Amino acid sequence: MKNYLLQRSLGGALSLGLLFTQTTFGQTGLQFTSVVPTDEQAIRLTWASSSNEVYEIDEADALASNPDGTTAWNKLYDDYPSQGTNTFWLDTGNYNYVPQILHPKNMPMRFYRIVDLGADTTSDQPSVSITSPSNGTAVSGELTIVVVASSDQPVIAGTKLYVDGQAMQMADSRTNYTESSGVTNYEIDSYSINTCEWGNETHILFATTECQTGFGDSINAGAVATGHGVSAFVPVLFSNLVTRISFSQPSFDPASGQTQQVSAVFAANCNWTLNIRDGYSNAVKSATGSGTSMLFNWDGTGNGGTDLPTGIYYYYISAQTNGASSYYTSGGSSGNGAGGPPSPSFTSMSSAGSDSGSATELWALSPESSEPPLPLAIIPPGFDTNGFTIFEASQYEVQALTQAVLAENKPLTETKSIKLVSSTSSSSFQSDNTSGGSSASSQDSPPAPQRPPANPVKGLAGTFGVGYDSYTGNGPGGVGFSTLPNGSLAGGHVAFENKSASFGITWKPLPLHKPEADNFVFAMQHYGWNNTLYQADAQLNVNNLRGSGTPFNNVSLGLLILHGTYGTSLDFAANQCFQMYFPITAGGQYLRMSEMNLGGSGTNGLKWMAIKACHSLYHVNWSSMKRAFAIPYNSNLHLLLGSDTDSASNDSLSAYWAKYMNFGTSTNYNPLTIRAAWYQAAKDAYRNIPFPNGSVISFVVAGDSACIDDMLQTNNTPTGNWFIDTPVQVYPYQ
């Protein structure tokens, strides 16, 4: 494996060099084939890969940083499926982790390594494709992307959309169904992106998905194997008058002295207007100007310097060409969040500000005339390009060619506006339109930001924490746990769900716990919450969950995603009651629910805690715990949310919960109570999932009676009187 060093010069440019080569983890032949900074100073990594493998990308800010001389590697991204013999991915940082891994442009240097996590554990990979838009489409403004995944396995673990190798937010809508024969499951996901947040050039879309051979949540589940699928690449031409809308702050908090720098580039000299609107679509701040670019520093106040509350604010830019002379510029740093995601163009602005759109590079034209040209740099090494026409041209010329072909709906050789001049050694374009950019004279851009990592919020709504255990350390077989002594003088062990108390249990892998946690983090950050706690697998130690010293008591809202079960024999180590238990891989121990002491004082103390696990709030045992005063909360906790039955893994459930609490269930701002959002999120996540016949899933909420209608925006002070809901059936649900 090759490890690369990226280092920023004093002038701010990134320099790239090979530092050393080594082989680790028993892998041979795993090496980078390309490490390229984009014009937005993101880093595009390409490595030699094997089909059906899964990879982890690690980064380090310095070598030999540990006391023993080894390097402290940080996981940057994982569960990334192979794209064949060559795989590429884009480093734009990772803002899900604590501490956050910043965009490369904000770091003086970065080292990389690729870790092969092994082959798919099922040979039956799912299928995934982008059905809209089609190859070579020219698009502007808001773009809807439809991804379809299918598998004959019972679980399709969602899809992910990538633009130029950068992961987008979770799908806006999702539909699940099973064909009439009951053999193949389908998922249709719809994503929306604002193409004005990228440059005017060809961008590469692709999607991934994962399937599982079972749900694996229940105590007697079988082994769970996984498979991955990657769609074909779909090149799409973004063509806008308003381009490269970007933001200096991924999360904007004026109270801490931050200013949100909003910038954009125009394809011609324009008169422009910026309107900042709140969650109710009211314009609260406006600015106007003219030129080929826009730069506005927002201090968070409204028109006239009025104070504005913390909340959601979107940015709308309108532009109209004014006839003034200009030249189109597509290069430069976008400043999107902590450094905007990249485009597939590998040219860049020089320090003098030269126009990257007019710089030439090599392109490859497929013999299929309906396929647009692609930058030769993105075609994987070893790909068969026999019959392709290789030529040198600028982005402007290629855009003109593509637009002409689309406009005339004719083979390339018959287009009137562009003529391809070819020879055995090179080719070039002659075009009637080499201005580049968009031909539109005016444009109203869609709301921004939609492109991660920037969030459409002002101020911080609060703090939250996430912990999960995926039980994947031993592959599809799961993690075995010894029996749990019940503390009686006569000896014995706790029986779980009427199973024999004399045998240990193997808890099956739940790989969906990671995307479920990450999608929750994405969603909460999107609505202005600060993620200060993220503990996964080995980091989630059972001792950190016991007692009042748990770090979850230092955040306002907590989410744990685990296996869970309930006892069917008295636990003499816990006041002789029946209660709930959670296996924790780190240390191989069970966490008794009564060992928890949830609730924190102060502004950011824990008020609301969700435990997404089977039987995490089994109401029969909850009543037994209450009678024995073996309670898992203190006087500071408002609500405890969980499941009364088995609780199937689902990568979208917690993200729906975040959205419904913060925004609501429709396109209009109308947040639900925390309790109502929990039930509705489960209903929507489980809708049309092909669970085994007879499956019933019920969720439940317990809490202080004064806090039953708590919202994230407004809440009441606990009075000490606790209730538990009658369990609410969330599946089947129509």
Image (spheres, grey):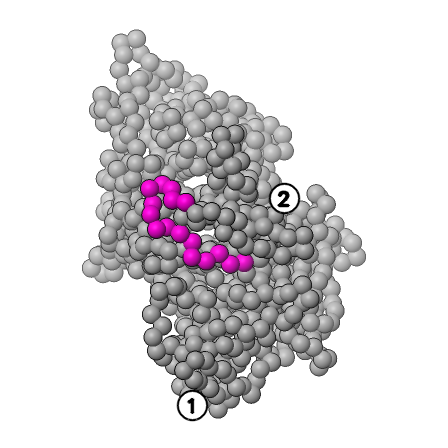
Q: Quadrant of residue 554?
A: top right
Question: Would residue 490 be found to the left or right of residue 351 on screen?
Answer: left
- Residue tagged by mark 1? 414
Taking 107 as reference, is 85 above or below it? below
Residue 327, x across and y down, in percent:
67, 76
In three-dimensional space, the C-alpha distance between marks 1 and 2, rounded to whole angstroms, equals 57 Å
Q: Is residue 31 magenta?
A: yes
Numbered tag placed on residue 530 in the rendering: none
Residue that appears at 38% across and 81% down: 369
Corner quadrant of residue 23: top left
Residue at 46%, 74% in the rendered image: 363
Closer-to-camera residue (368/528): 368
Q: Amino acid at mark 2?
A: Leu
Front residue of this view, candidates 589 and 445: 589
Question: Where on the picture, by quarter, is residue 366?
Answer: bottom left
Q: Which residues are magenta?
A: 22-37
Local SS, label 1:
helix
Residue 688: percent from the left, percent from the top?
32, 54
